[in-house]
Image (spheres, rainbow, N blue to C red):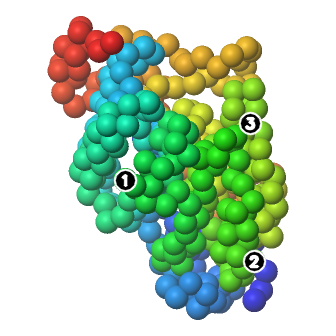
Amino acid sequence: MKQTDRRSFLKIAGTSLGIGVLYSAYPAAARGGEAGHLFSELGKSTGEKVTPFSFLQLSDAHVGFNGPPDPLGTKAFERAVDMVNALPRRPDLVLFTGDLTHDTEDRNVHVQRMKQFQEISRRMNVPMIRHVPGEHDAGLDSGGLYREVFGETFYSFDHRGVHFVALDNVTRPKPEVGAEQLAWLKKDLARFPKAAPIVVFTHRPLFDLRPDWEWFTSDGDEVMNLLSPYDNVTVLYGHIHRDDEHQIGAVHHYGARSLIFGFPDPSGAAGPRKAVPFDKDHPFKNLGIRTVSFNGAPRPGTAPLFIEDVELTAREFRGINGVQQFLRNPLV
């Protein structure tokens, strides 16, 4: 197979809802030429024809969390469901990158929080929903309850010629993937050619974004060593409750905002991690819309992705009068 530049392979266009990110995967050419040959080969590898599709990333709903720094509970999560259902083009799937629920030592309460998460997420008019755990879902019992309710904590699947890999970096005693999962990942990737499109979704970042805030994965370098031979890798993660974009080698890493509250820019904050305070006059501050589009074949030195963030204002929230009434009696 010919070696193909990653920018000639995949066109990514997306809309982050501030409460999530919409990605669209478009082959650069549907037929013929170098790209057409690549897509044909990938179809043989995965057994699926490579065709355009879109998907969503949502993260950190923390169902069960109420009170400071955000008294809205599941309101942003429910708003996300409304926005997904209002999209003019239905996404093929939704990826939740962890902390679906907020932890508690009361098993029965945690079960109810997981069931509430499922009830809300199932309102989305999408064909497929996939999850990975966050530390709040699985840290207290090494993922035991999470597996009972949601299934395995790591796995992979193919969709329209793209290979998706769910990685668990939260169920072990420290922030790591672990030797067993690394061996599984190596075997899982072995059947794919160098130019295969691979999307990894996980909770914690796989690089040292801010180790003193636990924004890292201790064996993330080992994961990246397994991914580094591939030209078209995207890593989606949550945990940091803010928009973030990093490129390390040929791998692009994207962090998503949460569905509950934000954290500050780690590069400008000193000391312990503190959530961005809730602003009752602007209840959706730090939530917004981010558009992500691929610029085709950019000139050398220009970014392949165009990103624009638009803050979601209270005026855009359906039923704002009801929300204001809610805020007069915040949950504690």
N-term-proximal mark, 3 vs 2: 2
Q: Which residue is mark 3?
A: 209
Viewer-nearest of discs 1 and 3 = 1
Q: Which residue is mark 2?
A: 194
21 on left or right of 29: left
Task: Please state which of residues 295 and 63 is positioned toward the viewer in this rendering.
Answer: 63
Using the image, determine if residue 332 lies above or below residue 95: above
Q: Quadrant of the C terminus?
A: top left
Q: Position of residue 311 (x, y in %)?
A: 45, 29
The answer to whether any part of residue 255 appears in the image is yes
N-term-proximal mark, 1 vs 2: 1
Q: Quadrant of residue 231?
A: bottom right
Local secondary structure at mark 1: helix
Viewer-nearest of discs 1 and 2 = 1
Q: Quadrant of the N terminus?
A: bottom right
Q: Amino acid at mark 3?
A: Leu
Using the image, determine if residue 5 lies above or below residue 313: below
Q: Which residue is mark 1?
A: 149
Q: Amino acid at mark 2?
A: Lys
Q: Position of residue 68 (x, y in %)?
A: 42, 14
The alpha-carbon separation of the residues under discs 1 and 3 comes to 31 Å
